[in-house]
Amino acid sequence: EVQLIQSGAEVKKPGESLRISCLGSGYNFSNYWISWFRQVPGRGLECVGRIDPSDSYTNYCPTFQGHVTISVDRSLNTAYLQWSSLKASDTGLYYCARYLGDKWGRGTLVTVSS
Amino acid sequence: DVVMTQSPLSLPVTLGQPASISCKSSHRLVYHDGDVYLNWFHQRPGQSPKRLIYKVSQRDSGVPDRFSGSGSGTDFTLKISRVEAEDVGVYYCMQATHWPETFGQGTKVEIK
């Protein structure tokens, strides 16, 4: 069974760093791009960016360009989304999904508050 | 960015009756390969989105045939032939033809 397993909820303070993960199982991880999305009440679903696990090529959505980093560890079948300095406005539910959204993780809730 | 506009945003429906959701894009969604990357998702409360339809009209595996997608150019539609109780939730259209991928605002379907 194809699954995307995301890491647990995080509570952080502004300025702190964070890395959340997305483990792919049940399929050849390198064959499918991984996309990241954010969902915030009142703002719907937003694209964060995507990565090709075969070569780590990434695209970032303009709103998130320069503020997040998407990476992958093929040996662990895991994709990551990380921040070096969180802001309160980064609060939200972050989903990973296989490219074109045929499978989604359950989401990681990130709360940034002083 | 391509703007996806859904209507209605709220859709009260009677069990067993049909339902229809419209999605209009600000740009044509035909990709270089000739395909149209327009997807429909269903999200129940507390759950992650689930894809129902891809490339305008292709149903995902396991999706009941009461769900159908249609459209072309900039106008697309999701139809439910006979609404069942499990169909409640929010439906989103999403385009993946142009970067960045963008979603509609969502249509909340509830039972009258």
Image (cartoon, coloured by chain):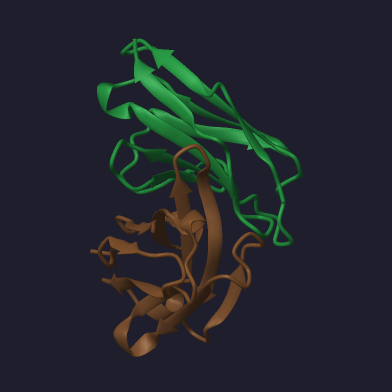
Q: At 41% from the left edge and 61% from the top edge, which residue is drawn?
A: A97
Q: At 57% from the left edge and 42% from the top edge, which residue is drawn?
A: B56
Colour of the chain lettered A: brown
Q: Is residue B18 visible?
A: no
Q: Is residue A76 visible?
A: yes
Q: At 47% from the left edge and 63% from the top edge, which residue is drawn?
A: A36
Whole-percent x, y for residue A6 in the image: 29, 65
Residue closest to the eye, A46 or A85 = A85
Q: Quadrant of residue A10?
A: bottom left
Name above or below for residue B22 compared with residue A44. Answer: above
Which chain: green?
A: B
Q: Quadrant of the C terminus of chain B?
A: top left
Q: At 53% from the left edge and 69% from the top edge, which residue is drawn?
A: A50
Whole-percent x, y for residue B75 in the image: 68, 32
Q: Quick check: B20 left or right of A20?
A: right
Q: Quadrant of residue A23?
A: bottom left
Residue closest to the eye, A10 or A103 = A10
Residue closest to the eye, A78 or A89 = A89
Instruction: Say how many tags the image has.
Output: 0
Whole-percent x, y for residue A62 in the image: 67, 62
Whole-percent x, y for residue B28 in the image: 75, 44
Name above or below for residue B52 compared with residue B106. Answer: below
